Amino acid sequence: MPVKTRPVEKFAKATAKCATEAATYGKCVVADYNSIHKDMCAKEFLRLKDCYLAASKKG
Amino acid sequence: MLPLRAIRPTILRHCLTTSSIRTYAAQTPGNPMLEIFDRRTKHLQKDRAAHNVEESRKVDYLKDEVAMRLCERLLDIKRTFPNVLDLGANSCNIARALTQPNIDYTTPDDTQTPPLAERISKLTCVETSRALLHRDEDLPFNKEIDITREVTPDLETLSYEPNSFDAVLSSLSIHWVNDLPALLAQVNTILKPDAPFIAAMFGGDTLFELRGSMQLADMERRGGVSPHVSPLADVRDVGSLLTRAGFKMQTVDVEDIVVEFPDTFALMQDLQAMGESNAIMHREAGPLSRDVLLANDAIYHALHREEGAQGIPATFRLIYMIGWKEGKDQAQPLQRGSGDVNLKDLLGGGQFEKP
Protein backbone atom coordinates (compact mmCIF):
# COMPACT_ATOMS: atom_id res chain seq x y z
CA MET A 1 0.00 0.00 0.00
CA PRO A 2 1.49 3.38 -0.89
CA VAL A 3 2.10 5.65 2.07
CA LYS A 4 -0.29 8.59 2.02
CA THR A 5 1.49 11.90 1.86
CA ARG A 6 -0.19 14.60 3.84
CA PRO A 7 -0.80 17.90 2.05
CA VAL A 8 1.43 19.69 4.54
CA GLU A 9 4.32 17.41 3.62
CA LYS A 10 3.93 18.20 -0.07
CA PHE A 11 3.75 21.86 0.87
CA ALA A 12 6.93 21.65 2.91
CA LYS A 13 8.74 19.82 0.15
CA ALA A 14 7.82 22.38 -2.48
CA THR A 15 8.76 25.25 -0.17
CA ALA A 16 12.14 23.73 0.49
CA LYS A 17 12.96 24.09 -3.20
CA CYS A 18 12.57 27.85 -3.02
CA ALA A 19 15.20 28.65 -0.43
CA THR A 20 16.66 31.59 -2.37
CA GLU A 21 13.31 33.26 -2.94
CA ALA A 22 12.33 32.62 0.68
CA ALA A 23 15.55 34.19 1.91
CA THR A 24 14.96 37.30 -0.21
CA TYR A 25 11.43 37.66 1.09
CA GLY A 26 12.50 36.96 4.67
CA LYS A 27 15.23 39.58 4.44
CA CYS A 28 12.80 42.13 3.10
CA VAL A 29 10.36 41.62 6.00
CA VAL A 30 13.02 41.42 8.70
CA ALA A 31 14.82 44.51 7.41
CA ASP A 32 12.10 46.77 8.78
CA TYR A 33 9.86 44.69 11.00
CA ASN A 34 9.03 47.52 13.39
CA SER A 35 6.98 49.32 10.78
CA ILE A 36 5.56 46.41 8.88
CA HIS A 37 2.44 46.94 6.80
CA LYS A 38 0.37 45.02 4.30
CA ASP A 39 2.09 44.16 1.03
CA MET A 40 5.33 45.71 2.16
CA CYS A 41 7.18 42.94 0.38
CA ALA A 42 4.53 41.99 -2.15
CA LYS A 43 7.02 41.79 -5.01
CA GLU A 44 9.32 39.42 -3.16
CA PHE A 45 6.39 37.35 -1.97
CA LEU A 46 4.99 36.91 -5.47
CA ARG A 47 8.36 35.66 -6.62
CA LEU A 48 8.39 33.17 -3.74
CA LYS A 49 4.86 32.07 -4.51
CA ASP A 50 5.56 31.60 -8.20
CA CYS A 51 8.53 29.46 -7.33
CA TYR A 52 6.44 27.43 -4.87
CA LEU A 53 3.67 26.92 -7.41
CA ALA A 54 6.14 25.78 -10.04
CA ALA A 55 7.84 23.44 -7.57
CA SER A 56 4.59 21.90 -6.37
CA LYS A 57 3.48 21.18 -9.95
CA LYS A 58 6.62 19.27 -10.73
CA GLY A 59 5.85 16.91 -7.93
CA MET B 1 -34.31 78.97 22.38
CA LEU B 2 -36.36 78.05 25.44
CA PRO B 3 -35.58 79.78 28.69
CA LEU B 4 -33.96 77.40 31.14
CA ARG B 5 -36.59 77.92 33.81
CA ALA B 6 -39.25 76.55 31.50
CA ILE B 7 -37.77 73.10 31.09
CA ARG B 8 -36.46 72.57 34.58
CA PRO B 9 -39.68 71.39 36.24
CA THR B 10 -40.29 68.73 33.61
CA ILE B 11 -36.81 67.27 34.11
CA LEU B 12 -37.25 67.16 37.87
CA ARG B 13 -40.58 65.42 37.66
CA HIS B 14 -39.15 62.90 35.27
CA CYS B 15 -36.34 62.02 37.64
CA LEU B 16 -38.59 61.55 40.61
CA THR B 17 -40.96 59.21 38.83
CA THR B 18 -38.28 56.78 37.67
CA SER B 19 -38.21 54.63 40.76
CA SER B 20 -35.90 52.07 39.17
CA ILE B 21 -32.78 54.15 39.76
CA ARG B 22 -30.38 52.10 41.82
CA THR B 23 -28.12 53.79 44.28
CA TYR B 24 -26.12 50.69 45.22
CA ALA B 25 -23.85 48.24 43.40
CA ALA B 26 -24.73 44.59 43.04
CA GLN B 27 -22.76 41.59 41.96
CA THR B 28 -23.98 39.64 38.98
CA PRO B 29 -25.20 36.22 40.03
CA GLY B 30 -23.02 33.16 39.55
CA ASN B 31 -19.29 33.00 39.35
CA PRO B 32 -18.23 34.84 36.24
CA MET B 33 -15.45 32.96 34.57
CA LEU B 34 -13.14 34.10 31.89
CA GLU B 35 -12.93 31.54 29.14
CA ILE B 36 -9.66 31.73 27.34
CA PHE B 37 -9.36 28.29 25.84
CA ASP B 38 -11.97 26.35 23.98
CA ARG B 39 -12.29 23.19 26.06
CA ARG B 40 -14.12 21.21 23.40
CA THR B 41 -11.52 22.02 20.78
CA LYS B 42 -8.71 21.01 23.09
CA HIS B 43 -10.45 17.74 23.81
CA LEU B 44 -10.88 17.01 20.10
CA GLN B 45 -7.28 17.89 19.36
CA LYS B 46 -6.01 15.52 22.03
CA ASP B 47 -8.34 12.72 20.97
CA ARG B 48 -7.46 13.04 17.30
CA ALA B 49 -3.77 13.18 18.07
CA ALA B 50 -3.92 10.05 20.21
CA HIS B 51 -5.86 8.05 17.63
CA ASN B 52 -2.78 8.12 15.45
CA VAL B 53 -0.87 5.99 17.93
CA GLU B 54 2.39 5.75 16.02
CA GLU B 55 2.70 9.46 15.31
CA SER B 56 1.56 10.36 18.79
CA ARG B 57 4.23 8.18 20.38
CA LYS B 58 6.88 9.65 18.12
CA VAL B 59 6.24 13.17 19.40
CA ASP B 60 6.23 12.21 23.05
CA TYR B 61 9.89 13.26 23.31
CA LEU B 62 9.04 16.54 24.97
CA LYS B 63 6.46 15.19 27.39
CA ASP B 64 8.68 12.27 28.39
CA GLU B 65 11.65 14.54 28.97
CA VAL B 66 9.64 16.97 31.09
CA ALA B 67 8.02 14.13 33.07
CA MET B 68 11.49 12.81 33.78
CA ARG B 69 12.76 16.18 34.98
CA LEU B 70 9.64 16.59 37.09
CA CYS B 71 10.09 13.21 38.74
CA GLU B 72 13.70 14.02 39.56
CA ARG B 73 12.32 16.57 41.96
CA LEU B 74 10.70 13.73 43.93
CA LEU B 75 14.17 12.40 44.73
CA ASP B 76 14.63 15.27 47.15
CA ILE B 77 11.66 14.21 49.23
CA LYS B 78 12.59 11.26 51.42
CA ARG B 79 9.14 9.80 51.88
CA THR B 80 6.85 7.12 50.65
CA PHE B 81 3.70 8.19 48.89
CA PRO B 82 0.79 5.78 49.38
CA ASN B 83 -1.63 7.71 47.18
CA VAL B 84 -0.57 9.97 44.34
CA LEU B 85 -2.60 11.88 41.73
CA ASP B 86 -1.32 12.68 38.25
CA LEU B 87 -3.37 15.65 37.16
CA GLY B 88 -3.72 15.84 33.38
CA ALA B 89 -1.74 12.71 32.74
CA ASN B 90 -1.56 12.87 28.91
CA SER B 91 -0.44 9.33 28.04
CA CYS B 92 0.73 8.64 31.62
CA ASN B 93 4.18 10.05 30.90
CA ILE B 94 4.79 10.53 34.61
CA ALA B 95 4.03 6.88 35.32
CA ARG B 96 6.55 5.91 32.68
CA ALA B 97 9.19 8.16 34.19
CA LEU B 98 8.52 6.83 37.68
CA THR B 99 9.24 3.26 36.58
CA GLN B 100 12.64 4.17 35.10
CA PRO B 101 15.55 2.96 37.19
CA ASN B 102 18.59 5.16 37.85
CA ILE B 103 16.77 8.41 37.38
CA ASP B 104 19.19 9.94 39.89
CA TYR B 105 22.17 10.96 37.78
CA THR B 106 24.05 12.49 40.71
CA THR B 107 25.03 9.10 42.09
CA PRO B 108 28.25 7.48 40.89
CA ASP B 109 27.89 5.36 37.78
CA ASP B 110 28.12 1.93 39.36
CA THR B 111 25.43 2.41 42.01
CA GLN B 112 21.95 1.37 41.04
CA THR B 113 19.04 3.42 42.27
CA PRO B 114 15.63 1.81 42.27
CA PRO B 115 12.82 3.41 40.26
CA LEU B 116 10.73 5.95 42.12
CA ALA B 117 7.67 3.77 41.59
CA GLU B 118 8.78 1.67 44.56
CA ARG B 119 7.92 4.54 46.87
CA ILE B 120 4.46 5.02 45.36
CA SER B 121 1.74 2.53 46.18
CA LYS B 122 -1.08 3.89 44.07
CA LEU B 123 -1.07 6.33 41.17
CA THR B 124 -4.29 7.80 39.85
CA CYS B 125 -3.96 9.25 36.36
CA VAL B 126 -6.71 11.67 35.43
CA GLU B 127 -7.05 13.09 31.93
CA THR B 128 -9.73 14.62 29.72
CA SER B 129 -9.00 12.58 26.60
CA ARG B 130 -9.83 8.89 26.84
CA ALA B 131 -7.87 7.99 23.71
CA LEU B 132 -4.70 9.62 24.98
CA LEU B 133 -5.02 8.27 28.51
CA HIS B 134 -5.46 4.66 27.40
CA ARG B 135 -3.00 4.82 24.52
CA ASP B 136 -0.19 3.03 26.31
CA GLU B 137 -2.06 0.81 28.73
CA ASP B 138 -0.65 -2.38 27.20
CA LEU B 139 2.99 -1.35 27.49
CA PRO B 140 5.22 -3.14 30.04
CA PHE B 141 5.66 -0.17 32.39
CA ASN B 142 2.03 -0.54 33.48
CA LYS B 143 2.90 -3.71 35.37
CA GLU B 144 5.54 -2.00 37.47
CA ILE B 145 3.26 0.54 39.06
CA ASP B 146 -0.32 0.43 40.27
CA ILE B 147 -2.12 2.81 37.88
CA THR B 148 -5.78 3.74 37.97
CA ARG B 149 -6.87 5.61 34.85
CA GLU B 150 -9.76 8.02 35.16
CA VAL B 151 -11.35 10.12 32.44
CA THR B 152 -12.79 13.42 33.56
CA PRO B 153 -14.93 15.77 31.47
CA ASP B 154 -12.78 18.70 32.51
CA LEU B 155 -9.75 19.23 34.67
CA GLU B 156 -11.19 22.24 36.39
CA THR B 157 -13.50 20.42 38.75
CA LEU B 158 -11.82 17.66 40.73
CA SER B 159 -14.19 15.21 42.31
CA TYR B 160 -11.98 13.92 45.10
CA GLU B 161 -12.41 13.98 48.84
CA PRO B 162 -10.47 16.64 50.74
CA ASN B 163 -7.23 15.43 52.33
CA SER B 164 -6.92 12.33 50.17
CA PHE B 165 -3.58 12.51 48.31
CA ASP B 166 0.01 12.30 49.55
CA ALA B 167 1.23 14.14 46.48
CA VAL B 168 -0.26 15.68 43.35
CA LEU B 169 1.91 15.70 40.25
CA SER B 170 1.11 17.37 36.95
CA SER B 171 3.14 17.55 33.79
CA LEU B 172 2.37 19.73 30.76
CA SER B 173 -1.37 19.96 31.23
CA ILE B 174 -2.38 22.86 33.39
CA HIS B 175 -1.37 25.47 30.81
CA TRP B 176 -4.69 24.65 29.10
CA VAL B 177 -6.76 25.32 32.21
CA ASN B 178 -9.00 28.37 32.04
CA ASP B 179 -9.24 29.07 35.74
CA LEU B 180 -5.85 28.28 37.18
CA PRO B 181 -6.43 29.93 40.60
CA ALA B 182 -9.54 27.82 41.19
CA LEU B 183 -7.77 24.63 40.12
CA LEU B 184 -4.82 25.26 42.42
CA ALA B 185 -7.17 25.93 45.32
CA GLN B 186 -8.86 22.58 44.66
CA VAL B 187 -5.52 20.81 44.49
CA ASN B 188 -4.64 22.33 47.84
CA THR B 189 -7.89 20.97 49.27
CA ILE B 190 -7.47 17.39 48.05
CA LEU B 191 -3.89 17.17 49.34
CA LYS B 192 -3.22 15.80 52.79
CA PRO B 193 -1.64 18.26 55.22
CA ASP B 194 2.07 18.76 54.58
CA ALA B 195 1.88 17.10 51.15
CA PRO B 196 3.51 18.52 48.02
CA PHE B 197 2.10 19.64 44.70
CA ILE B 198 4.71 19.38 41.96
CA ALA B 199 3.88 20.58 38.47
CA ALA B 200 5.42 21.55 35.18
CA MET B 201 3.75 23.68 32.55
CA PHE B 202 4.61 25.66 29.44
CA GLY B 203 5.23 29.28 30.25
CA GLY B 204 5.32 32.72 28.70
CA ASP B 205 8.10 32.59 26.15
CA THR B 206 7.28 29.15 24.81
CA LEU B 207 7.34 29.25 21.01
CA PHE B 208 8.13 32.96 20.98
CA GLU B 209 9.79 32.47 17.58
CA LEU B 210 6.62 31.09 16.01
CA ARG B 211 4.42 33.67 17.70
CA GLY B 212 6.58 36.49 16.33
CA SER B 213 7.02 35.22 12.80
CA MET B 214 3.30 34.42 12.51
CA GLN B 215 2.47 37.98 13.48
CA LEU B 216 4.86 39.39 10.92
CA ALA B 217 3.54 37.06 8.22
CA ASP B 218 -0.05 37.98 9.08
CA MET B 219 0.76 41.68 9.03
CA GLU B 220 2.62 41.60 5.76
CA ARG B 221 0.21 39.33 3.90
CA ARG B 222 -3.14 40.32 5.34
CA GLY B 223 -2.60 43.59 7.15
CA GLY B 224 -3.69 42.41 10.61
CA VAL B 225 -2.95 39.81 13.22
CA SER B 226 -4.91 36.93 14.64
CA PRO B 227 -3.79 34.82 17.62
CA HIS B 228 -2.09 31.67 16.33
CA VAL B 229 -0.23 30.70 19.49
CA SER B 230 -2.20 30.41 22.71
CA PRO B 231 -1.32 32.69 25.61
CA LEU B 232 0.58 31.20 28.54
CA ALA B 233 1.14 32.11 32.16
CA ASP B 234 4.20 34.10 33.06
CA VAL B 235 6.83 32.87 35.49
CA ARG B 236 6.31 35.89 37.69
CA ASP B 237 2.63 35.08 38.16
CA VAL B 238 3.09 31.49 39.26
CA GLY B 239 4.46 32.33 42.71
CA SER B 240 1.53 34.57 43.54
CA LEU B 241 -0.91 32.01 42.13
CA LEU B 242 0.47 29.38 44.50
CA THR B 243 0.32 31.76 47.44
CA ARG B 244 -3.23 32.69 46.59
CA ALA B 245 -4.21 29.01 46.58
CA GLY B 246 -2.77 28.62 50.08
CA PHE B 247 0.44 26.74 49.31
CA LYS B 248 3.42 27.15 51.61
CA MET B 249 7.14 27.00 50.89
CA GLN B 250 6.83 27.42 47.15
CA THR B 251 9.66 26.88 44.74
CA VAL B 252 9.36 28.05 41.15
CA ASP B 253 12.04 27.58 38.57
CA VAL B 254 12.33 27.88 34.84
CA GLU B 255 14.06 25.88 32.19
CA ASP B 256 14.32 26.33 28.45
CA ILE B 257 14.33 23.36 26.13
CA VAL B 258 15.29 24.27 22.59
CA VAL B 259 14.35 21.77 19.92
CA GLU B 260 15.64 21.97 16.39
CA PHE B 261 13.21 21.37 13.56
CA PRO B 262 13.92 21.16 9.81
CA ASP B 263 11.24 23.77 9.04
CA THR B 264 8.14 25.40 10.48
CA PHE B 265 5.89 22.76 8.91
CA ALA B 266 7.62 20.01 10.86
CA LEU B 267 7.25 22.09 14.04
CA MET B 268 3.54 22.62 13.46
CA GLN B 269 2.96 18.98 12.55
CA ASP B 270 4.63 17.89 15.77
CA LEU B 271 2.61 20.33 17.84
CA GLN B 272 -0.53 18.97 16.25
CA ALA B 273 0.47 15.36 16.89
CA MET B 274 1.14 16.27 20.53
CA GLY B 275 -2.38 17.67 20.78
CA GLU B 276 -0.87 21.03 21.64
CA SER B 277 -2.26 23.13 18.79
CA ASN B 278 -3.81 26.50 19.41
CA ALA B 279 -7.12 26.33 21.28
CA ILE B 280 -7.79 29.93 22.14
CA MET B 281 -11.39 31.13 21.95
CA HIS B 282 -12.27 33.33 18.99
CA ARG B 283 -9.43 32.08 16.91
CA GLU B 284 -9.95 32.08 13.18
CA ALA B 285 -12.01 29.24 11.87
CA GLY B 286 -10.55 26.96 9.27
CA PRO B 287 -6.98 26.23 8.33
CA LEU B 288 -4.27 28.85 7.96
CA SER B 289 -3.99 30.35 4.53
CA ARG B 290 -1.17 28.98 2.42
CA ASP B 291 0.14 32.45 1.76
CA VAL B 292 0.60 33.10 5.45
CA LEU B 293 2.22 29.71 5.97
CA LEU B 294 4.60 30.31 3.12
CA ALA B 295 5.48 33.77 4.39
CA ASN B 296 5.81 32.53 7.95
CA ASP B 297 8.32 29.86 7.02
CA ALA B 298 10.49 32.38 5.19
CA ILE B 299 10.33 34.93 8.03
CA TYR B 300 11.02 32.33 10.73
CA HIS B 301 14.13 31.22 8.85
CA ALA B 302 15.31 34.78 8.31
CA LEU B 303 14.85 35.73 11.97
CA HIS B 304 15.89 32.67 13.92
CA ARG B 305 18.03 30.38 11.87
CA GLU B 306 21.55 30.35 13.21
CA GLU B 307 24.57 30.59 10.92
CA GLY B 308 25.47 27.16 9.64
CA ALA B 309 22.56 25.41 11.35
CA GLN B 310 20.56 22.84 9.44
CA GLY B 311 17.18 23.66 10.90
CA ILE B 312 15.38 26.24 12.98
CA PRO B 313 15.19 26.39 16.78
CA ALA B 314 11.94 26.32 18.75
CA THR B 315 12.07 27.26 22.41
CA PHE B 316 9.89 25.59 24.99
CA ARG B 317 9.96 27.36 28.35
CA LEU B 318 9.05 25.10 31.22
CA ILE B 319 7.89 26.42 34.55
CA TYR B 320 8.31 23.99 37.42
CA MET B 321 6.47 24.70 40.62
CA ILE B 322 6.42 23.07 44.00
CA GLY B 323 4.04 24.07 46.74
CA TRP B 324 3.28 22.42 50.06
CA LYS B 325 -0.06 22.25 51.75
CA GLU B 326 0.06 23.74 55.19
CA GLY B 327 0.62 21.11 57.88
CA LYS B 328 1.47 20.74 61.53
CA ASP B 329 5.20 20.67 62.37
CA GLN B 330 6.01 21.66 58.82
CA ALA B 331 9.40 23.20 58.21
CA GLN B 332 9.07 26.95 58.04
CA PRO B 333 11.10 29.30 55.93
CA LEU B 334 13.43 31.45 58.03
CA GLN B 335 13.00 35.18 58.35
CA ARG B 336 14.62 37.24 55.65
CA GLY B 337 18.06 38.42 56.62
CA SER B 338 18.47 35.82 59.35
CA GLY B 339 21.11 33.80 57.48
CA ASP B 340 24.59 33.84 59.00
CA VAL B 341 26.50 32.10 56.21
CA ASN B 342 27.29 33.97 53.07
CA LEU B 343 26.24 31.97 50.03
CA LYS B 344 29.28 33.32 48.26
CA ASP B 345 31.54 31.54 50.76
CA LEU B 346 29.50 28.39 50.48
CA LEU B 347 29.27 28.13 46.71
CA GLY B 348 32.43 29.99 45.78
CA GLY B 349 32.66 32.34 42.84
CA GLY B 350 30.71 35.54 42.98
CA GLN B 351 32.84 37.38 40.47
CA PHE B 352 30.83 39.43 38.08
CA GLU B 353 33.76 40.63 35.99
CA LYS B 354 34.30 38.84 32.75
CA PRO B 355 37.31 36.52 32.85
Image: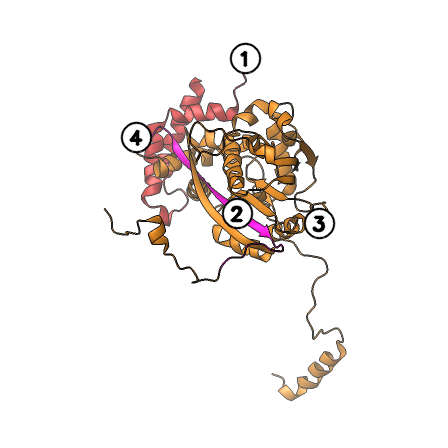
Chain colours: A red, B orange
Residue underneath mark 3: B162
Question: For mark 3, does the 10 Å Cα neighbourhood hold few (<14), some (14 to 19), or many (20 or more) residues?
Answer: few
Provide the residue designation for mark 2: B321
Q: Which mark is residue B308?
A: 4
B299 vs B35, nearest the viewer: B35
Element marked by disc 4: loop
Q: Position of residue B45 (x, y in %)?
A: 60, 34
Residue B90 visible in the snapshot: no
Given the current orientation, which residue lies at the most extreme top position?
A: A1
Q: Give the amino acid at mark 4.
A: Gly
- Residue B267, how many percent across, how many down? 47, 32
Q: Answer left or right for B3 relative to B346.
A: right
Q: Earlier in the sequence, mark 4 or mark 2?
A: 4
Q: Are marks 2 and 1 on the same chain?
A: no
Query: Which amino acid, by three-letter code, is at mark 1?
Result: Pro
Q: Nearer the viewer, mark 2 or mark 1?
A: 2
Amino acid at dot 2: Met
The picture quadrant where one finds residue B261 is top left
CA gap, disc 4 and disc 3 = 56 Å
Q: Position of residue B201 (x, y in %)?
A: 53, 43
- Relative to the observer, which residue lies in front, B120 or B180? B120
Q: Are marks 1 and 3 in contact (CB under 8 Å)?
A: no
Query: Amino acid type of disc 3?
Result: Pro
Magenta stretch: give its range.
B308-334
Labels 4, 3: front one: 3
- Kindly identify which residue carries mark 1: A2
